[in-house]
Image (tube, rainbow, N blue to C red):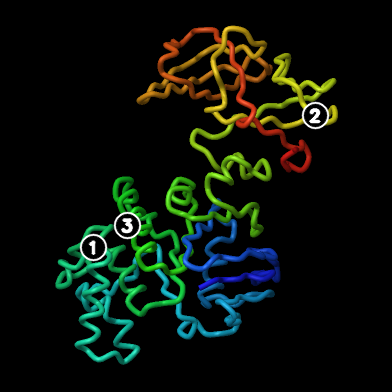
Amino acid sequence: MEIKLNNLTKVFQSKKQEETIAVNNLDITIPSGKLIGLLGPSGCGKSTTLYMISGLLKPTAGSIFFGDDDVTTVPPEERGIGLVFQNYALYPHMTVQQNIMFPLENLKVPKEEAIKQAQDIADLVGIGNLMNRKPVQLSGGQQQRVAIARALVKKPRVLLLDEPLSNLDARLRLQTREEIKRIQRETGITTIFVTHDQEEAMSISDEIVLMKEGIAQQKGAPQEVYDVPTNLFVAKFLGTPPINIFDGEIKGGILYVGDADLGKSKLKDQEVVVGIRPEGFKVVEDSSFQAHVEFVETIGRDTTLIIKDPHTDEKRTFRAIVDADEQIKPGDNIKLSVKPHKLFLFDKKTGEVLK
């Protein structure tokens, strides 16, 4: 089921008649059968967008299409959506089976058929052996699977997940997000997954929509958005460790950070913001980009260097990820080159990427 959001806008008005634009002219298409991550910091409008798609919130302007159907004013119960909340919202007095069957009872599905459908969907999400337990007897991950099963059992056209993993510990988050991806692939249902966690979004989404202050900043495959950010916000939001940011200048066709020559540039002479991914550095024998190593963190084959920035008067550090074979120690003075495809230049005023 393809979803189209056409100029979708939501404005909230306070008691003092002050307006807050939560979603601003959002215009995106969500492909049928894909898992799309709505990603961004708190307050960026991602959950508001999800609730407008679900019908729980009425848009101030714009339209929502499920396929060819305009559902902008259609009530939630008639949209054919399955919605999973952050807090699971299970009925504590009901068993797993009863929780999953509840939507089918509302649809007047015969009891025997409802039991069969509930068991089938419970088997799909990996809780088929827990049907007689109550929520209090389940782990957080199991409760989340019950919530997903309850959303899927009525065979919705669209599955909506609002921060579904935020209440789980780190290991359970990892396991459950893998399960969500598996379930989505097996069912082929169009799924929208809201999260502020870039690792979650990058790991399970077919595409991500990165939002800021109600505006979509970039949409695309996770690796594509990471490799080719459209602006400084996108570049800084994605990446662990985060991208390193420097003040730079292009003079005479050469890019400089302080007195370090980072190579030729086809752009006009100007001051720029320079972004370099941590993995974009390489230790070399000869370079004007010099650095003093403050700390060394080695994990597996990679070494992360915490480096005192010698090209600015500020007391700041940046990170470089290099091969562990380099055998670098704290206190070493090293020279670095930069891989061109890991270096980005941004307009100092607008933050837009310069090409």
Residue 311 vs 182, above or below: the answer is above
Measure the alpha-carbon separation of dots 1 and 2: 55 Å
Left of 295 or right of it: where is 152?
A: left
Residue 297 vs 147, above or below: the answer is above
Give the percent coordinates (x, y) of residue 294: 50, 15
The answer to whether one can see residue 167 in this image is yes
Task: Identify the mark at residue 255; answer none if there is no mark.
Answer: none
Amino acid bearing label 2: Lys
Give the percent coordinates (x, y) of residue 163: 43, 59
Task: Identify the mark at residue 266; answer none if there is no mark.
Answer: 2
Q: Residue at x 19, y 70 (%)?
A: 134
The answer to whether one can see residue 20 in this image is no
Q: Residue at x 46, y 23 (%)?
A: 304
Q: Tell me the mark number nearer the camera, choosing from 1 and 2.
A: 2
Quick one: 23 or 130, which is closer to the camera?
130
Residue 282 vs 276, above or below: the answer is above
Quadrant of res 329: top left
Q: Answer few, some or many: residues within 10 Å of disc 3's Cα (few below 14, many 20 plus, some between 14 and 19).
A: some
Q: Answer few, some or many: residues within 10 Å of disc 1's Cα (few below 14, many 20 plus, some between 14 and 19).
A: some
Amino acid bearing label 3: Glu
Residue contact between numbered discs 1 and 3, judged by CB atoms under 8 Å: yes
Q: Answer few, some or many: residues within 10 Å of disc 2's Cα (few below 14, many 20 plus, some between 14 and 19).
A: few
Residue beneath disc 1: 126
Measure the alpha-carbon separation of dots 2 and 3: 47 Å
| Mark 3 residue element | helix
Q: Residue at x 62, y 70 (%)?
A: 5
Residue beneath disc 3: 179
